[in-house]
Amino acid sequence: MDISDLIKRITPLYNEYKQNSKTISAVNAVILMWEIGNILKEYLDQNDVAPHNLYREVYGNSEGGSNVARRSWITREFQGRCYRIRNMFESKDFIRKDFPSLVGFTAFRECMPFLDNKKYKLHGDERQNLLNLLNSNNSKGFVLKEIRKIQANKIGIKNSRNQRLVDLDGEKKLFIDFYNYIFRLSKEESEKISQAFNDYQIDAKLIKDIANNTSALSSDGLKFFDFDDNKINQISPSSDEDQIWIDYINILKDFMGQSNPKKIRRFRRLIPPERIVKLADMLNQFNLK
Amino acid sequence: MKLQISPKIVMSVASLYNDTNRIFMEYIDNSIDSAEAFFDDQSNAYSKEINIDFYLDKKMVTITDNCYGITNIPKIVQSIGDSDKKAQPWTNGQFGYGIYSFMAACNNIEIVSKLENNSYGLMIPIGRDQFDTKSVDDVFFDDPKEVDFIYSSGTKVTLSKFDNQSFKQIDFNEIISEVEKHFELLLGRKNLTISLFNGITGEKHICKSFDYEEFDGEYYEEHLSELTFSGNKNNATYTLPADPPVHIFLKILKGKALKKPPVFISKGRRIGEIKSIKGFRTKYKNEIWGHPSITGYIDLSGFLEPTIARNDFRNNNESKALFSTLLDLEELISEVIKDVNKASEHKHYKSLEQYLNKELSKLAKIDALNFRTEHLSGSDINLQSGGDGEDKTEGAGSEHHREGELSGVHSEHNESGEDPDGYGPSEDDGSNPSEKDGSGASNKEAENPFEDTGFKGSERKKSGFNIEFVDGDPIWNIETDKPIRSQLIGGTIRIFREHPEFQKRIKLTLTKEPKISERLITYLAGEITVHYKDKIQSREGQAEYNVQMFENLVEFIYMFEDAVSGLAGKNLSDLDG
């Protein structure tokens, strides 16, 4: 079975899940996901491929320099969750057994680490109490609140999703400074802009290269173009404003030199793609002016 | 009094006038000529207030002035074709036929004129029917009668007994436009007022000279006191003096289609649009001289002699020298027009964006697909604080921007609606049950660091997308190593104008203005559909690879194409409204 066949097999189940998302009961959603997970498991058992690599194959957007285009609408996270649910329950019948009246899918999802993560998995009474809570007649809000308490007790440490973003604070600050500088410059008269570029020895081609490489940060799978180092060397860093061009070009060069898009993706969490393309647009406007 | 010229000649010269509104210009022109005695070139002012009043009534038209008056009224009928004004360089009339232009539209003219030193005015009535004879000997006029006149000096011309068709042709707005165009330089003189009254509607209009300063743009101005041209035979260069100098004033407007092409002016009167002068032979009549953004005039000050119909120039060395000068200028003007076209295009594409947004919004309403951002003015929310000024569903650090999830070459996905119980489909993988709130970095920023979002106004999501035409180079897909045609960033579909496929579908008019072709409409519909359907699939699930999938896709293309089909054949500038 190749990936296309795998997607074909998952598709009807996935679509049933998506198209009934507002009406499907939580336990039936878990069962549907189990079925998808079962298909994934079959594939993984028959092929020498790691789960996360398979998810990338199905969805696309890989980390490397190839296979970056999207292949389907079935996200990696969704596949991962399905596969985990499949591994939690040997048979889908066990789902109904454990969750005869599951209060909500979110509550279930939040409890997943207590059901399958080796480190946090609950056993005995603790597990039973959790199942009781998930099957209780309490409101969804109440149940979630209780789950948060268990999470706080059992897990405690919150791994911030921003923990690696601090590494890019410098790039973020410089982007913002450069963006604001370009914005201010764009408000000047054409003559003044021309004069500024003459002073800094920045020509239309270099501006175009900066604009194009800035645009290429806006999403995955876009091509960067090499800078002409001779043009960069011509910029004389005699003032802060000259230096900001060099610093920004260096950031772009650093991104361009990355072997995978992780760093650029992190950067996009700090700087929205909308801002990235807007900076490129402002740079392109200089050439028009 | 006896006529001294064939009546048939007078009738046939009058027949050159085929627009009634144009006939009135002749009489206003005569009034202006008659005011020259009071004009001082140095101060560009008349020594007394000159009033020329045009009055339109149900049956007649009168033109009254307080100018010098006619020195020799009998000569009007006795010496047609031998005007006194012919020898005067400062006046426009040459032949004395202009006063007979009435014959093209009505039967009667009555001329009353008074000189300053006379205690009375002289009145002479002329009828077209008097000329309806073969023999000059059959035409007689009564001697002028002594009458009162309202001004100390001046002339009053009354036209009456209009032909029905000719009277219907009279258009007050057209007359306003004709006067202001025809005498645009003269109207800039101090102490001259040309007033137009419509006695039928009660409307009154004081004519004004055209204000070129009102419009932003690049201009070219030169006063040429000599003009050169090369002879055909030996390539020798000839230089001709121009005294007073020929004044060239051309303005290329930025982002504005004025549709007032540059004109030739002779002795303060418009001869015609440069593009319409047959004697001026150039490849760029429309591209340059008829470009909607170029305006201005070339004031010949008598350097060239217009033909009797005043719509062209005689073919002589002067006209060769002038036209040769203009041909030399074309390259320079062409360069400026290119820049202006670029600037205008940007504005025009903004209008096209709005049009497409509107139409796409209607279709997207059906699917409840809301990605278009609308800023509401008048609210008190300052976007500079407490956010990044961007859509929160797409902004940096929002839960939709989890690493590794979003990007695609064509689109960036938000997984949505994944949660069957409506709690929202957490984007995390569930391995660590924390941080479901997706608190991204910039959401936590108290201050928005970007300086261009200081406006006030809250945001809301509307149906459709924001469509944007991008000026710069298209970005390239790393896998296909080809430029991409469009991309979806947040709620904005960015369409690259410089993409070769886009450019192939752009038609240019003779003035190099982009025109919307049907092929371009199909292209836009296709590009927009890709992103539209991608978002639909994100919501509804995995597209199944069968013929239905392609049918759905094409159906939407056709729907959108149909919705915007009204654009086909339009110039982009037509969308500016």
Image (cartoon, coloured by chain):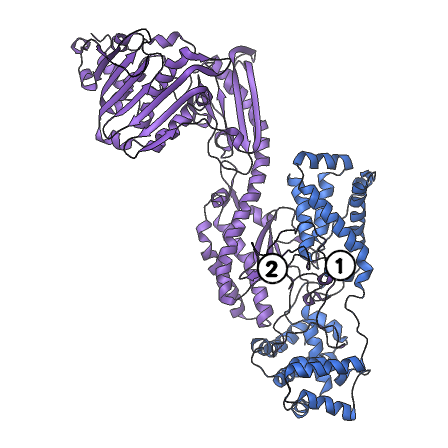
Chain colours: A blue, B purple
In the rendered image, residue B568, in percent from the top left (x then y), is placed at 46, 49
Chain assignment, label 1: A
In the rendered image, residue B288, in percent from the top left (x then y), is placed at 52, 30
Left-right relation of B456 to A114: left
Chain assignment, label 2: B
Q: Secondary structure at mark 2?
A: loop
Q: Secondary structure at mark 1?
A: helix
Q: Name above or below for residue B526 compared with residue B263.
A: below
Residue picked out by circle 2: B491
- In contact (CB < 8 Å): disc 2 and disc 1: no
Q: Name above or below for residue A26 compared with residue B358.
A: below
Residue visible at 54% across and 68% down?
Answer: B549
In the rendered image, residue B142, in percent from the top left (x then y), is placed at 18, 10
Residue picked out by circle 1: A267
Q: Which three-letter amino acid code belongs to the residue tagged 1?
A: Phe
Front-most of residues B571 and B508: B571
